[in-house]
Image: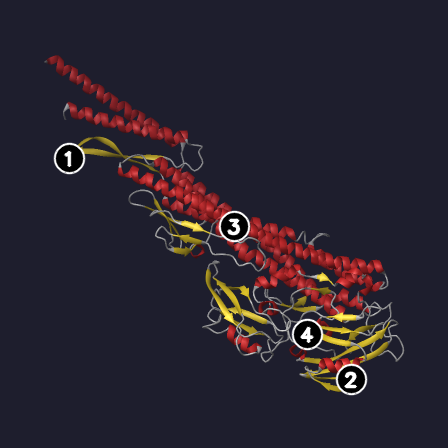
Amino acid sequence: MTLNAIMNTASSGLSAAQTQLRVISDNVSNVNTPGYVRKIADQKTLTGTGIGSGVEIARIRLATDTFLQAASMKAGAESARQAVRYELYDRIQSLFGDPGGDNGFFSQIDSLFSAFAASGENPTSSPSRQDALFKTQALFDEAGRISKQIDAVRQDADARILSAVEKANSLLEQIEGLNLEIARASATKGDSSGAQSAQSALLGELSKLMDVQITQRPIGGVTVRTNGGAMLAGQGVGRISYNPTGTVTSTSAFNEIYVTEPSGQKRALLDGITSGEIKGLVELRDVDAPAAAARLAELVSHVADELNRAHNANTAVPAPNRLTGRNVGQSLETALTGFTGQTTIAVVNASGVIQNRADIVFSGATMTINGVAADPTTFLATLNSQLGGATASFVDGKLSIQAPAGNGISIADPAGVASNKAGRGFSHYFGLNDLVGTDTPAIYDTGLTAASAHGFTAGETMSFRFTDERGARIRDIEVAVPAGGTVGDLLTALNDPITGIGRYGSFSLGADGALNYTGAGNPSPSMSVLDDRTRQVPSGVSVSALFGIGEGTRASRADSFTIRSDIRTSPANLALAQLNLGAAAGSAALTSGDGRGALLLADAGQRTSAFQSAGGAAGGSMSVSRYASELAGDIGGKAAAAKTRAQTADALATEASARQISQEGVNLDEELVLMTTYQQAFNASARMIQAAKDMYDTLLGMV
């Protein structure tokens, strides 16, 4: 080996050792920098004509473990998803208050029925009536408040989705910018470790927003895609776009989140993500919160219905001069068809003595009134002729009965042969003496059959949206009301696989007239109503409102209940007595001290009621009190489960991060050993240079 070769070999060793020491210096100085990945200078042997000629630094790279990095990012994405779901669902749980406390929402239900029991003990007491009414209205006001707050939580989630999308776009732009810097450094064999370290930190932040797939590019840098394959960065930068909904209600339809790839192709983001903050926000907004709202609405709807059932079996003393029912969403002819049993409409004077009465016996599509044959088309005329001065009318879907001046109207069903349609008596079905009112239909067992006239105009349309289990939109479908005028014709049009929703699910009509939707496949797509332009004649009610189509429609009921205005103004109008149909002629059939009706109201919470499926719960026959207990347990259980999932996901993310840091982070002991090694290597190279110099000096001295 020549002296020049020795000098070159020693110089290369000196330069390599200097670079190694500089890398170690960077590592040690960043030992406490979060997310810093230690650098490694890869060293290789130089050869010439098969003979070693020194060393050089081939590249400076990061000590990245791709497996641990992927595992850490995946765990971080799931942790972010579960954390945001728990955070927002815990807010929903807190709206209901402590289930075991005295001031929580569920305790108000028991308090309400207890107040009616107290009224029964002293039916003439105005304070006890006022207390019962106050607690009833307070319950429905609280239900409305909770419903609106759930919508507010959903709106918060929707706004945070936009913030997350904007942050993701910013991260993607930075990642793509670093791709260019890393590629340039790679082409010139420069040090790109700083850019790589910064890019790794950005990828970690991005993965918390949504799970992504990362692959290394041959030219340096990374390619970022969603799990569905949508390009986000690496071949140009993609852009995520989302237009949030302004004011969120239970019936709001949300826009799709799109990814526009660098090529210009537009794809749905939710098709390709399974975790991350965006996924958690979408799940809370579209699944968790609506389920809680739907179950709340189902509960308060049945509280109202059972109170109305009891109140319609009662009467105030003195009886009110006019009874006006609720909008039944049908024509009178359709509403009357299907009744069985008997009911009595009586005109009573101020002393409670019956002046006139109409005993109605129903038999499917016909009836008799005081023995006079009638049918749905002649019902009003026959009833008015038999009531002697009282007037019954049907306008805009509402049945009204008014007594002559100085008298009142009272309705009662004979024991054992009570009128019935869809599980409701005549007065209850039409809501003639409801205690709690609402502007829209709240109970969806309509009593309609396939042969019933639906009353909607042919050509009117309603639009449905179907989404998959990930929340991504599958398709929007518009369905027109068919030319056929029966409920069966409407069902056929809805379920048509070509022009209807038949490819994704089907509607079926229950024996009680409730319209039920069943999705096709497993998992089945979710269905919601985007728009409904149908209007029933004469009621003006839409198809979705009449049958409660879509969970959002059903959830909207929770904030619509209020005590009837005349009762709220005057507690004396609260119906706590019952009409005595067996009273002797000329004797009072109503007495002010009668509190039997109050006991019916007090027992309303224990009466078995048919709850429909809501919020993932199957429903079934149970009492209002039991359903309230189950809902309280369900809300608490889901919140506890969400907390457990969040804690578990966070623990996994912490462990994955710790393992990644252990592999990729800076270990001072290792760096000290390496520093000592390269210091010795530097000294050895320096001594070789000194030895070569001495040999040069000796040779020159010999000349």
Front-lying residue, 452 or 149? 452
Give the SS element for disc 1.
loop
On residue 134, which mark appears?
none
User: Comparing marks 2 and 1, which lies closer to the viewer?
Assistant: 2
From this view, report whether residue 412 is shown above or below residue 20. Answer: below
Question: Does label 3 or label 2 sit earlier along the sequence?
Answer: 3
Label disc, if present, on residue 370 of the rendered structure: 2
Mark 1 packing: few (<14 Cα in 10 Å), some, or many (20+)?
few
| Marks 1 and 3, how far apart at CA | 60 Å
Q: Are marks 3 and 4 in contact (CB under 8 Å)?
A: no
Query: How far is disc 2 from disc 4 in space, using C-alphas?
Result: 24 Å
Q: Label 3 to label 2, Cα distance in Å? A: 66 Å
**Quarter occupied by residue 664:** top left
Tell me which amino acid carries mark 3: Gln
Q: Farthest residue in the right direction?
A: 586
Q: Nearer the viewer, mark 3 or mark 4?
A: 4
Q: Report how far apart the C-alphas of labels 4 and 1 lie in the structure.
A: 99 Å
Residue 677 rendering spot, x and y as whole percentages: 31, 28
Residue underneath mark 4: 423
Residue 10 is drawn in which quadrant?
A: top left
Q: Earlier in the sequence, mark 3 or mark 4?
A: 3
Label 4, secondary structure: give it: loop
Between marks 3 and 4, how big is the CA–CA gap?
43 Å
Q: Residue 291: horizontal and vertical position, in percent? A: 58, 59
Near-viewer residue (355 or 99): 355
Quadrant housing the C terminus: top left
Identify which residue is drawn at 72% across, 80% down.
380
Q: Is disc 3 surrounded by few (<14), some (14 to 19) or many (20+) residues within 10 Å? A: many
